[in-house]
């Protein structure tokens, strides 16, 4: 779905709702969404917009009551900070509040506009420490870069014994603020720091980075620049006992795919977001996202695979050990499991950024629900300040006085192209190793008894 189509779908569906089912006595509230739908940060903006659209779908469906009609417009900032600020200024002529500032550069440019307009701005993903307490009208759902930096610095130093750390830094507001945070919390002098742009000579960047003889490199970058830097460092031989790390910018399928096998083994930080977990509301969000944004043919194949897996399991459970068809039923059940796994791989699974979009819209809706009447735009602040432990798909949402969300990050590692929780993965490996050792020990004991 391209940007123009997405905008028409959001507006058309919402206006249809207003016309068909809402009387004139119900007040209408306009929200603007200003995101980089194109450009280098477009991969993040698209995912955030998908999450916003899914949250709007839930509102349109009538599953929840709200004393307002809500109209949303999605606008492409093209990743240009000044353009984003200008678009926000125009949007605030009609919009009560806005979601925007997907990047730190955009958010930093947009905050003064929100301040001047006395209107709330919610950033799904900006992480610059400069944004903490920037305005009473600014809130963000992503932890400050200082939190990511502190988590990773502690891990690299204490868990995987990195002695000399070098920074490879994209020349952007995001890259600079993230690298500055890592440097501040590292606790000792860095081995070195290299700045690059997407158009830089990657060979020169890699040569300088490896010249510092570091046993750990932290890449402060996002999008394609992050994927290219990871590939370049791996191709130059930075692997094995050398630790490569980055931020949650890696926790999106498009960047992982762009980095390819070079991403394997890379450590990164991110708040907890388990797409395979049973907990609500995340489980329902993941299921709805997969159904809405997966190719229809792939979705149909997945549903058929689920049905076949259930049929095969039921058939197997109904057989006793003496049944002549037991072996065939087991084979069918195993085949059904494999087919289901393959069908699931073809689904479009939401990234953490889609969850941030969903929760950003959820915060606006939650604030509206706290307000019986809105006399002036600044009244919306009362609704924002009333939000307490709001359930979200990216975790419970609670804001500090600085406008920062109260969240913490964990360490993830890319294994076989997929991000895994490092602690859980390590525990599972240890458990399997112990089981294997016990099995071998039992075999030895049986052998000794038979001698």
Image (cartoon, helix red, strand yellow):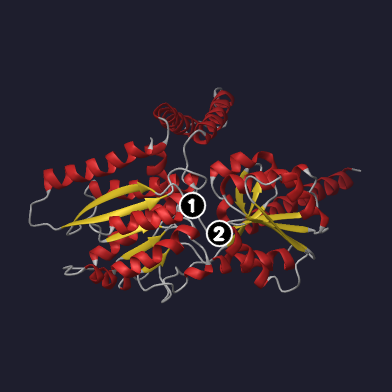
Residue 15 sits in quarter: top left
N-terminal of the pair, mark 1 or mark 2, is: 2
Nearest the camera: 375 or 20? 375
* Rendering coords of residue 160 (x, y %): 75, 62
| Nearer the camera: disc 1 or disc 2 | 2
The local crowd at label 1, few if under 14, some if 14 to 19, many if 20 or more residues have their Cα within 10 Å, is: many
Q: Which residue is situated farthest in the left direction here?
A: 24
* Rendering coords of residue 403 (x, y %): 41, 71
Nearest the camera: 379 or 431? 379
In the rendered view of the protein, which quadrant contains the C terminus?
A: top right
* Rendering coords of residue 26 (x, y %): 12, 57
Say which element carries label 1: helix
Which residue corresponds to mark 1? 352
* Rendering coords of residue 72 (x, y %): 27, 50
Say which element carries label 2: helix
Dot label at residue 4: none
- Disc 1 and disc 2 in contact, CB within 8 angstroms: no
Residue 280 visible? The answer is no
The residue at 70%/70% (across/down) is 186
Q: Which residue is situated farthest in the right direction here?
A: 451
In the rendered view of the protein, which quadrant contains the N terminus?
A: top left
Image height check: is 318 above or below 271? above
The local crowd at label 2, few if under 14, some if 14 to 19, many if 20 or more residues have their Cα within 10 Å, is: many
The residue at 24%/63% (across/down) is 368
Residue 223 visible? The answer is yes
Label 1 – label 2 distance at C-alpha? 18 Å
Which residue corresponds to mark 2? 174
Answer left or right for 274 relative to 433.
Answer: left
Answer left or right for 13 relative to 50.
Answer: left
The residue at 67%/68% (across/down) is 183
């Amino acid at each position: 779905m391209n940007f123009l189509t997405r905008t028409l779908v959001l507006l058309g569906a919402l206006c249809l709702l207003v016309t068909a089912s809402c009387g004139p006595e119900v007040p209408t509230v306009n929200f603007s969404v200003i995101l980089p739908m194109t450009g280098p940060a477009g991969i993040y903006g698209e995912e955030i917009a998908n999450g916003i659209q899914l949250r709007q779908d839930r509102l349109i469906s009538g599953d929840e009551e709200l004393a307002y009609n809500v109209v949303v417009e999605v606008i492409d900032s093209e990743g240009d900070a000044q353009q984003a600020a200008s678009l926000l200024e125009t949007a605030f002529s009609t919009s009560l509040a806005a979601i925007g500032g997907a990047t730190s550069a955009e958010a930093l440019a947009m905050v003064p506009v929100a301040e001047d307009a006395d209107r709330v701005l919610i950033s799904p993903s900006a992480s610059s420490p400069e944004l903490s307490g920037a305005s009473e009208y600014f809130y963000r759902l992503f932890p400050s870069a200082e939190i990511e930096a502190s988590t990773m610095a502690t891990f690299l130093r204490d868990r995987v014994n990195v002695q000399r750390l070098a920074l490879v830094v994209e020349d952007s507001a995001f890259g600079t603020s993230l690298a500055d945070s890592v440097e501040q919390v590292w606790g000792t002098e860095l081995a070195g720091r290299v700045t690059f742009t997407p158009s830089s000579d990657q060979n020169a960047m890699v040569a300088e980075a490896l010249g510092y003889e570091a046993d750990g490199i932290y890449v402060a970058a996002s999008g394609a620049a992050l994927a290219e830097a990871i590939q370049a460092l791996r191709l130059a031989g930075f692997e094995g006992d050398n630790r490569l790390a980055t931020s949650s910018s890696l926790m999106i399928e498009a960047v992982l795919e762009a980095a390819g096998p070079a991403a394997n083994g890379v450590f990164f930080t991110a708040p907890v977001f388990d797409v395979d977990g049973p907990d609500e509301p995340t489980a329902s969000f993941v299921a709805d996202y997969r159904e809405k944004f997966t190719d229809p043919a792939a979705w149909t194949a997945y549903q058929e695979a689920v049905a076949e897996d259930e049929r095969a399991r039921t058939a197997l459970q109904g057989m006793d050990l003496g049944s002549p068809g037991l072996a065939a039923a087991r084979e069918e059940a195993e085949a059904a499991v494999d087919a289901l796994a393959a069908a699931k791989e073809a689904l479009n699974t939401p990234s953490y950024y889609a969850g941030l979009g969903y929760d950003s819209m959820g915060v606006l809706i939650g604030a509206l629900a706290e307000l019986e009447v809105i006399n002036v735009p600044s009244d919306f602040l009362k609704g924002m300040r009333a939000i307490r432990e709001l359930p979200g798909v990216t975790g419970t949402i609670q804001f500090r006085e600085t406008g920062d969300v109260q969240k913490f990050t964990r360490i993830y590692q890319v294994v076989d192209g997929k991000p895994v929780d490092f602690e859980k993965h390590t525990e599972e490996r240890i458990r399997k190793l112990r089981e294997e050792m016990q099995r071998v020990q039992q075999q030895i004991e049986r052998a000794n008894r038979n001698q």
